[in-house]
């Protein structure tokens, strides 16, 4: 959680989401490595979502920070969707 908080702080400084892997590099990874990366991204996505919810529940709402965390979360969701598409075989009917 501490590493995630640090990643969020760094991302809020320059407003760019943290990069775990480019989509171009995911072509070189095996299915097992893609699954591991997908699991990590999902965990980080959930952690950011929990942090956003916790900030609303505690009443500490820095809207700029929340907006940036949502931006990071959306970027992670796009990466998760890309990796899921890489793992799903194309079936031509």
Image (cartoon, rainbow, N blue to C red):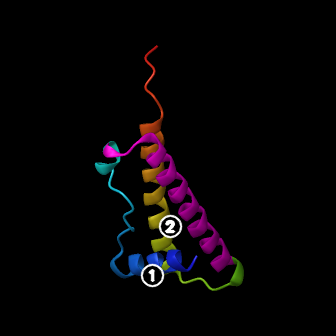
Which residue is at the far right?
A: 57
Name the element at disc 2: helix
Residue 85 percent coordinates (x, y): 44, 38
Indicate the quadrant where residue 14 lies: bottom left
Residue 45 percent coordinates (x, y): 55, 61
- The quadrant of the rendering that contains the N terminus is bottom right
Q: Can residue 35 be seen in this view?
A: yes
Residue sitting at x 37%, y 46%: 29
Residue sitting at x 35%, y 70%: 16
- Report if residue 54 lies within the magenta region: yes
Which stretch appears magenta? 28-56
Give the alpha-carbon distance from disc 2 to disc 1, as whole Å. 13 Å
Residue 4 percent coordinates (x, y): 51, 74
Q: Is residue 81 visible?
A: no
Tell me which label, 2 or 1, sits earlier in the chain: 1
Residue sitting at x 36%, y 74%: 15
Which residue is at the far left?
A: 24
Residue 26 percent coordinates (x, y): 35, 47
Up-down relation of residue 17 to residue 81 (above or below) = below
Indicate the quadrant where residue 52 lies: bottom right
Which residue is identified by label 2?
70
Pointer 1 local density, CA inside 10 Å: few below 14, some 14–19, many at least 20 = some
Closer-to-camera residue (7/70): 7
Residue sitting at x 45%, y 81%: 9
Which residue is identified by label 1?
9
Magenta span: chief secondary structure: helix
């Amino acid at each position: 959680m501490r590493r995630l908080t640090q990643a969020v702080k760094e991302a809020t400084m320059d407003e760019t989401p943290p990069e775990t892997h480019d989509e171009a590099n995911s072509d070189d990874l095996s299915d097992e490595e893609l699954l591991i990366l997908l699991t990590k991204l999902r965990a980080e996505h959930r952690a950011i979502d929990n942090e956003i919810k916790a900030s609303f529940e505690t009443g500490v709402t820095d809207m700029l920070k929340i907006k940036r965390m949502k931006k990071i979360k959306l970027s992670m969701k796009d990466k998760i969707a890309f990796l899921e598409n890489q793992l799903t075989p194309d079936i031509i009917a």
